[in-house]
Image (cartoon, rainbow, N blue to C red):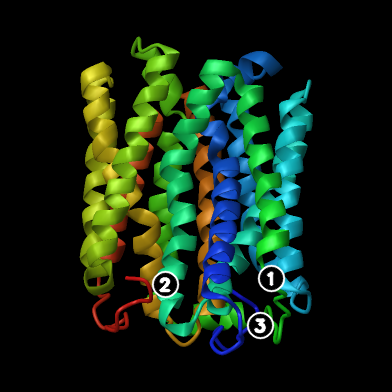
């Protein structure tokens, strides 16, 4: 979501607007592929664990490892590649994730899968930390906001639609096929970037010193990072293990896949609904998200998540989580309108760290406590978000509309 370069918009460069939008589409496909790859194991824990002879809690490391590595690689890759053409960096990273998923597809030992997931984490953190700012260099200035929204939509769509689609493919053709498909998608994105992205030389670099500076000096950023930690950790504590929870309620694998697809559709709707108003009401929407996620997880734990009730609660859950990425991102941009690169790098790191931590906590709870414990933990973290976001936050966020919203 950050760019190390701050060049002028692609106005007057002679670049065709049509080619610019094709380049935006290529970057969007790349980030969709990377985020789908990071979260794909959520829907495949049971079959992967069975095939490679590990528990579902241990299989949750497939989410923990790339999330943790991505949290570290977001600022490191951005700073370390600060003088390298951004087209080359993005191409290498998306090609890396393609190769890593193909390696997972052919792995005969869980250690190999974890090694591949480590590479996925490097690619996710670095790519996401750079890709958002690329829009400024691909389309005319008046279209930058729309291009940013499309690229960021790749993150959101992967979160709420890519996982259920991959789960369905895994149920129909096997989990190895699902990993191979994402790997092929990554290599396709690489080819498209090679042909569609223009040269994107870096002009100036983000330094490590800027990151702690913006965190210490900007209370709005600190609160946004705390909200990100609570909401994302809480969601992934529970959502990482939603498949075995549903199966324990007597729902077959194919029906679980369809239910996760319903979750994805609800998430897309939630993203659209939040995106229409988040520029003016980001604090209110974050509070509403906290209430919705809390209600969904608590009701899931209480009712047991049978078929009809499970579908209804997944719709509610999807509506809430679908609104999360666009809302949190808007909060960060409004909190630091003059330091978006540094603030966004912190946000990307915390988002991915929270995915990893949520999966790790969920795995430990799932293996050692009652199955529904992950739902109660997730709900508790969502409730804490109400206290943080509902505190003295007025006046901390820019009142100007955020680009793309």
- At which x and y percent is residue 210? 61, 83
- Position of 34 with respect to 347 (left or right) is right
Q: Is residue 359 above or below residue 283?
A: above
Q: Comparing marks 1 and 3, which lies closer to the viewer?
A: 1
* Residue found at x 45% / y 66%: 225
Dot 1 or dot 2: first in sequence order is 1
- Residue hosting label 3: 209
Q: Which of the image's four quarters has the N terminus?
A: bottom right
- At which x and y percent is residue 279? 28, 72
Local secondary structure at mark 2 = helix
Q: Which numbered marker is on residue 78?
A: 1
* Residue found at x 56% / y 71%: 20
Gap between marks 2 and 3 measured at Cα: 19 Å
* Residue found at x 53% / y 78%: 136
Dot 1 or dot 3: first in sequence order is 1
Q: Is residue 122 visible?
A: no
Q: Which of the image's four quarters has the C terminus?
A: bottom left
Q: Nearer the viewer, residue 362 or 116?
A: 116
Gap between marks 1 and 3 measured at Cα: 13 Å
- Residue hosting label 2: 332
Local secondary structure at mark 3 = loop
- How many neighbours does mark 1 have within 10 angstroms: few (below 14), some (14-19), or many (20 or more)? many
């Amino acid at each position: 979501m950050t760019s190390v370069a701050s060049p002028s918009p692609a106005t007057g460069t002679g670049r065709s607007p049509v080619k610019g939008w094709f380049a935006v589409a290529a970057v969007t496909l790349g980030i969709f592929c990377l985020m789908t790859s990071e979260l794909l194991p959520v829907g495949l824990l049971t079959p992967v664990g069975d095939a490679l002879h590990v528990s579902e809690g241990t299989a949750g490391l497939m989410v923990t490892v790339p999330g943790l590595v991505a949290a570290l690689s977001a600022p490191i890759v951005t700073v370390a590649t600060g003088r390298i053409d951004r087209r080359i960096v993005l191409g290498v990273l998306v090609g890396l994730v393609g190769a890593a998923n193909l390696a997972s597809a052919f792995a005969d030992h869980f250690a190999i899968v974890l090694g591949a997931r480590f590479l996925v984490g490097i690619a996710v953190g670095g790519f996401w930390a750079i890709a958002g700012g690329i829009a400024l260099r691909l389309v005319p200035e008046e279209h930058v906001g729309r291009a940013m929204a499309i690229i960021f939509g790749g993150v959101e769509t992967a979160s709420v639609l890519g996982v259920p689609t991959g789960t369905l493919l895994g149920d129909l053709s096997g989990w190895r096929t699902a990993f191979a498909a994402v790997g092929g998608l990554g290599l396709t994105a690489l080819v498209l970037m090679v042909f569609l992205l223009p040269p994107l030389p870096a002009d100036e670099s983000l330094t490590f010193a800027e990151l702690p500076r913006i965190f210490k000096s900007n209370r709005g950023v600190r609160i946004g990072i705390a909200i990100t930690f609570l909401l994302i950790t809480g969601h992934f504590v529970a959502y990482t293990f939603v498949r075995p929870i549903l199966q324990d309620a007597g729902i077959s694998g194919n029906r679980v896949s369809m239910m996760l697809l319903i979750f994805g559709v609800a998430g897309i709707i939630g993203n659209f609904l939040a995106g229409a108003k988040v520029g003016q009401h980001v604090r209110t929407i974050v509070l509403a998200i906290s209430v919705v996620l809390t209600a969904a997880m608590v009701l899931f734990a209480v009712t047991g998540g049978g078929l009809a009730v499970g579908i209804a609660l997944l719709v509610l859950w999807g509506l809430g989580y679908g609104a999360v990425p666009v809302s949190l991102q808007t909060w960060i941009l409004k909190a630091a309108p003059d330091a978006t690169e540094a603030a966004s790098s912190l946000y990307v790191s915390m988002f991915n760290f929270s995915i990893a931590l949520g999966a790790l906590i969920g795995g430990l709870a799932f293996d050692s406590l009652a199955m529904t414990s992950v739902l109660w933990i997730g709900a508790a973290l969502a409730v804490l978000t109400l206290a943080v976001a509902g505190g003295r936050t007025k006046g901390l966020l820019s009142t100007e509309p955020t680009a793309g919203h």
